[in-house]
Image: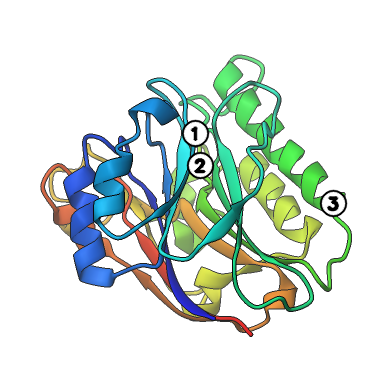
Amino acid sequence: MQFRLATWNINSVRLRLDLIERLNRAYAPDILCLQEIKCVEEQFPRAAIEALGFPHIAVCGQKGYNGVAILSKIPFSPGDMRDVCGRGHARHLSVKLDGPAGPSPVEVHNLYVPAGGDIPDPAVNEKFKHKLDYLEAMESWFSGLGNRDRNRMILVGDLNVAPLETDVWSHKQLLKVVSHTPPEVDRLNRVLAAHEWVDVMRRHVPPEEKLFTWWSYRNRDWRKSNRGRRLDHVWTTPALGDAAHGMTVASEARDWEKPSDHVPVITDFAID
């Protein structure tokens, strides 16, 4: 089975429906995982999405905030809508792709980790504490999964952590800025290790090279300043081996009209 998967923090699906259409024309993804859709399921523009060629749609929504969705041209079976941290937030959704039986189904997990606010101190910033708690809950979840050699899982989404020094425009200046602080990076690395996840993006772009997926709206000329961060991720379990054979960061989407501050990450897969 070959397919193209895109992940994108769309920052309101109803506001940026035309950008989804543009991405579909430019890259023709078979699966599109969206974060921060900012609507409940009843408000999701299902008919418009189906008209773009995505007949299979799963939505985990929340009024005005958060929310994730998986749009697919490939049939799938419903998976989980896991309340990872017990806060009642719509931040996770998974599906099982219809395709080759293999040792186990291919699961796609779409996640939106809390941003964490502005102050990197859990004692005074509840949002930052929530983020750390969420990452710890992810570690516990993945540590508890068995069959590490058999589980065929793809995890994508806005994880809101830029773990490597080259995942931010200035490691030194961002060490105390939420998204790149040591407590966040340490916890994300523990999540990676909990199920021996593979960082697909860094398989295709060497760790010593800069790699960004987010640029603040505050930057008037985002290309010139290039003060970016890699907040969006694509991971696979070891059982998928080298199934991810191509990866593209669609940075041109940051120049589209009324853009999200995130850009799509596109990965090509070939799975036996």
Whole-angstrom CA distance, mark 1 to mark 3, is 23 Å
The residue pinned by badge 2 equals: 179
Q: Can residue 210 be seen in this view?
A: no
The quadrant in which the N terminus is found is bottom right
Task: Tell me what residue is drawn at x 84 percent, y 51 percent.
Answer: 143
Q: Which mark is residue 115?
A: 1
The residue pinned by badge 3 equals: 143
First in residue order: circle 2 vs circle 3: 3
The quadrant in which the C terminus is found is bottom right
Q: Tell me the amino acid under the disc marked 2.
A: Ser
Front: mark 2 or 3: 3
Please say if the residues under marks 2 and 1 sit with CB atoms less than 8 Å apart.
Answer: yes
Whole-angstrom CA distance, mark 2 to mark 1, is 7 Å
Residue 261 in the image, given as x and y percentages of width and height: 28, 44
Q: Residue 153 carries which label?
A: none
Q: Tell me the amino acid under the disc marked 1.
A: Ala
Task: Tell me what residue is drawn at x 39 percent, y 27 percent.
Answer: 42
Whole-angstrom CA distance, mark 2 to mark 3, is 23 Å
First in residue order: circle 2 vs circle 1: 1
Q: How many labels does the image show?
A: 3
Please say if the residues under marks 1 and 3 sit with CB atoms less than 8 Å apart.
Answer: no
Outermost left residue: 257
